[in-house]
């Protein structure tokens, strides 16, 4: 019987991947879908997504195919140069990652152990990385990484990291880590309240002399306001992770929704048309988790308004983001 350690890794990064539809369903339904190999869209809350990640990590670890004669070890095998004390790769520095692992000892050579894992990948996974090493006080070792797809709105994906180390005894120590990243759902509260009758759109740059040429707009068309609100309401919440972003000029597009003139805004969206494309929302004065928007959101808003919004500072090339078909 193997021993496992499942832990959440808590520390901060920048945002990345997408999220599907939101809602709440029982974790048992997701576990059944994962066990059957299904990768359908499943809507979840945060607790359910974490539970699904832990269930998936346990399922994948139980499913690791081992060489004949492999014996489970309750602790790190001795004589490994401390290499098996940690994963060969990862987990990502992300509070939404579950890491589940186990150790074994097997007779035979390091080459044979690695060849076994190459020819017996986890179900539904594809090879995504490998490496090897040896040196003074570093026993010969090698690792393989296999990646499995995620579940829309629930899991970003899974990695199985297999590490083999030649032990001082002549046998081979094995460590398997399953690292599952679960998605943070968009809060149900992060929706623009109904009843907006006025939308004020303005574009602001970081330096007075480099302000984008877009003049402020006041929109009173109920149909246009509702359509733009629906575009923002459909955005996925930004996920933790490391992402390469485009150059950020410091420009922000501010969209303020009002029930009537003179009232405080129901909601304010500050959208970055470049950079990481984040949209910072404030609903009834309360700051919400950032969303993913980017140039596509600005393009869509421009199409609703029937004009391309000019969001680049003067002197930064073309002055607008054009609508695309």
Image: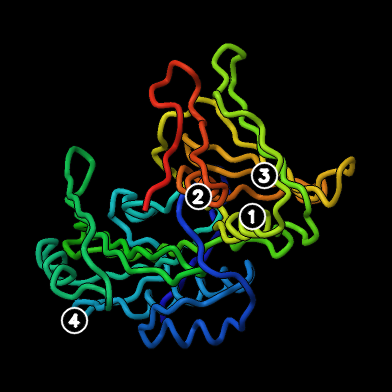
- Local secondary structure at mark 2: helix
Can you see residue 93?
Answer: no
Please tell me in which quadrant of the rendered image residue 112 appears.
Answer: bottom left
Q: In the rendered image of this protein, does residue 271 appear above or below residue 222?
A: above
- Residue linked to disc 1: 224
> Foreground mark, 2 or 4?
2
Residue 278, image x, y percentages: 55, 43
Residue 250, image x, y percentages: 54, 26
- Of callouts 3 and 1, the N-terminal one: 1
Q: CA distance from mark 2 to mark 4?
A: 62 Å
- Of callouts 2 and 4, the N-terminal one: 4
- Of callouts 2 and 3, the N-terminal one: 3
Q: CA distance from mark 2 to mark 1?
A: 10 Å
Residue 89, image x, y percentages: 33, 52
Q: Nearer the viewer, residue 127 or 61?
A: 127
Can you see residue 149?
Answer: yes
- Local secondary structure at mark 1: helix
């Amino acid at each position: 019987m193997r021993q496992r350690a499942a832990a959440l890794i808590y520390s901060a990064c920048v945002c990345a991947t997408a999220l599907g539809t939101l809602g709440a369903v029982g974790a048992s339904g997701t576990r059944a879908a994962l066990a059957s190999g299904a990768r359908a869209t499943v809507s979840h809350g945060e607790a359910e997504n974490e539970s699904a990640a832990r269930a998936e990590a346990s399922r994948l670890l139980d499913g690791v195919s081992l060489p004949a004669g492999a014996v489970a070890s309750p602790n790190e095998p001795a004589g490994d140069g401390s290499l098996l004390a940690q994963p060969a790769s990862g987990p990502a520095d992300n509070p939404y990652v579950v890491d589940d692992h186990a150790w074994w000892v097997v007779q035979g050579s390091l080459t044979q152990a690695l060849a076994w894992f190459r020819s017996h990948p986890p179900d539904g996974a594809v090879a995504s990385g490998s490496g090897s090493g040896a040196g003074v006080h570093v026993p010969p070792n090698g690792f393989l990484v296999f990646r499995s797809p995620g579940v829309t709105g629930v899991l970003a994906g899974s990695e199985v990291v297999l590490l083999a180390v030649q032990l001082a005894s002549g046998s081979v120590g094995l460590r398997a880590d399953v690292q599952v990243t679960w998605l943070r759902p968009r809060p149900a509260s992060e929706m623009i309240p109904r009843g907006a009758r006025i939308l004020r759109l303005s574009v602001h740059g970081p330096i007075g002399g480099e302000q984008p040429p877009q003049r402020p707009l006041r929109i009173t068309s109920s149909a246009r306001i509702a359509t733009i609100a629906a575009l923002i309401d459909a955005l996925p919440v930004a996920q933790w992770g490391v992402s390469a972003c485009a150059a950020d000029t410091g420009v922000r597009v501010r969209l303020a929704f009002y029930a009537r003139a003179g009232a405080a805004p129901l909601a304010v969206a500050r959208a970055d048309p470049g950079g990481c494309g984040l949209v910072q929302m404030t609903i009834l004065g309360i700051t919400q988790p950032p969303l993913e928007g980017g140039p596509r959101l600005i393009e869509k808003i421009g199409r609703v308004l029937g004009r391309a919004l000019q969001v680049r500072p003067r002197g930064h090339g073309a002055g607008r983001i054009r609508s695309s078909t």
